[in-house]
Image (cartoon, grey):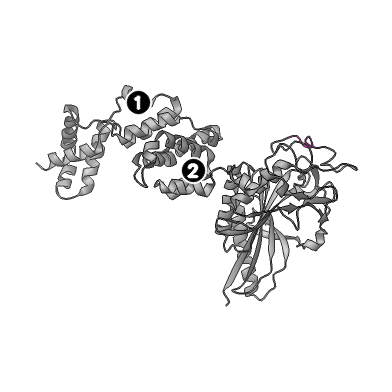
Amino acid sequence: MSDYVPTIGLEIHAELRTKTKMFCCSKNDADATEPNVNICPVCMAHPGTLPVINYDAVRHVLRVGVALGAKLADYTEFDRKNYFYPDLPKGYQLSQYEYPLVAGGELNGVEVTRVHLEEDTASSVHTEDPSTGSGQGGTTTIDYNRAGVPLMELVTEPVIKSSKQAGDFARELQTLLRYLGASEANMEKGQMRVEANISVAPAGERGTKVEIKNLNSFRAMERAVEYEIQRQTAALEKGEAVVQETRGWDEGKQATFPQRIKEGSADYRYFPDPDLPSLRLSELPELSTASLSATMPELPWERRARYLALGIKSDDAQLYVQEPVIGSFFEEVLSLLKDDAARPANGGARVLLASNYIANDLVKIMRDIEKRDSGYQSRITISADNFRKIIDMVADKRISSRTAKDLLVETAKSGRDPEEAAKSGNLYQVSAGGDFEAVVTDVISKNAEVAEDFKKGKAAALEYLVGQCMKALKGAGDPVSLRELLKEKLSK
């Protein structure tokens, strides 16, 4: 049996964040709920209308090119991609064929072929026939709000070798688009759609390419790619030919299914659009690589590297990069701990402590809020300053870790100053004094058998006694001091 190797290339579409559509002044609003309100004679292809290129859309794509380290075009033009479908009012799509805005580049270790601009199509809304409960006999309506929305298409080289690598690439692109402000790239809203081209062949040979269209989540894409690799491999092992075609993904069946024979570029009869001028971008100095580079924010991989240099765990660094609300909160806390953050890797103990509480305890609190109220990602109900005070109290051993977790919940709910809450609740950690010593003596007396187990060499017995002391002190004891005092008393 031959060893079959998968080859994967991705085509990713993202709706760009602009005020108006790609070639007209109709509003670009992904949240519009009423159909056919953001339309005009241009995007509805009325006779005699003329398109005008959206400057902001061009700039967004060029900034993506700069982030990818790609070559920006000097000359570019728009082409007509001809095909008929009800969601395409003109009967053709304005796109870029021979002269894309961006060529080359790399992201997440994957080479990029090109990035170009085009216009989105309308939305087809299918309804079931109530008498049959199926699509047969149902109706299809068209919502043209999306028709003409600026759409960026990124095409990778066919160098991806696994579903995981494909998923990692798509997630990183989504994060990049959000950092640049180019797109919300919300897959649930259809603002980002992925198509995967997959072929399987013995090592060193070329296989037959199959395209999977309109994958609307990362998990769906990964599952579809994995399924298709297995499907093609099984066919080849049986001596069957793989058909070059376009397939869809059935989430319910967790399987791809054939849709149509794959078109080639000749089928679309591309030719330059006569109504749109070609562009010489060198005539616009504000769109040069140097000018655009000066406006770039800190990019996701740069931010991730900065966190790792502080000693932050890899998973936590990824959380702060991918989740904007949590990442912004961590940045606020970092600014309050700037002296600690300036230390070498693993030297900023308070920064690492803060990261641990954010990535674990604070995220859990936010998820609990989400279950009650929904939408936790827009809600962090504790201020960065109050959070920093809790971290300082833990680091200075004024409160225990257990108390810190409780204070975090309390402060997130009430907004109280955590230092006042700790004082009024007698939560400050004690490590000496008559009451402290009396609690230790009492716990030893009430747990004589456990005390004897410790004397016989059972280390776990000591931790049990520490826990009982902490319980008696209502979490306000210093575990280190308790441990030392217990050892001292049990050695007598």
Q: Give me the disc on residue 79.
A: none
Callout 1, which amino acid?
Answer: Glu
Q: From the viewer's perspective, is residue 179 above or below residue 419?
A: below
How many angstroms separate mark 1 from mark 2 (CA)? 27 Å
- The residue at which mark 1 appears reads as 419
Point 58% across, 47% down: residue: 176
Q: From the viewer's perspective, is residue 21 above or below residue 249?
A: above
Q: Give me the disc on residue 320.
A: 2
Indicate which disc, 1 or 2, sits on the residue closer to the N terminus: 2
The quadrant of the picture occupied by the C terminus is: top left
At mark 2, the secondary structure is: helix
- Measured as percent of width and height from the top left, residue 80 is found at 82, 53
Point 29% across, 25% down: residue: 426
- Measured as percent of width and height from the top left, residue 184 is found at 63, 42
At mark 1, the secondary structure is: helix
Q: Please state the extent of the stretch shown in magenta in the rendering.
A: 33-39
- The foreground one among 143 and 66 is 66
Q: From the viewer's perspective, is residue 234 above or below residue 391?
A: below
Q: Residue furthest bottom?
A: 1
- Give yes or no for residue 36 being in the magenta stretch: yes
Point 21% across, 48% down: residue: 459
- Give yes or no for residue 49 being in the magenta stretch: no
Q: Residue furthest right?
A: 47
Please name the predominant secondary structure of the magenta segment in the image. Answer: loop
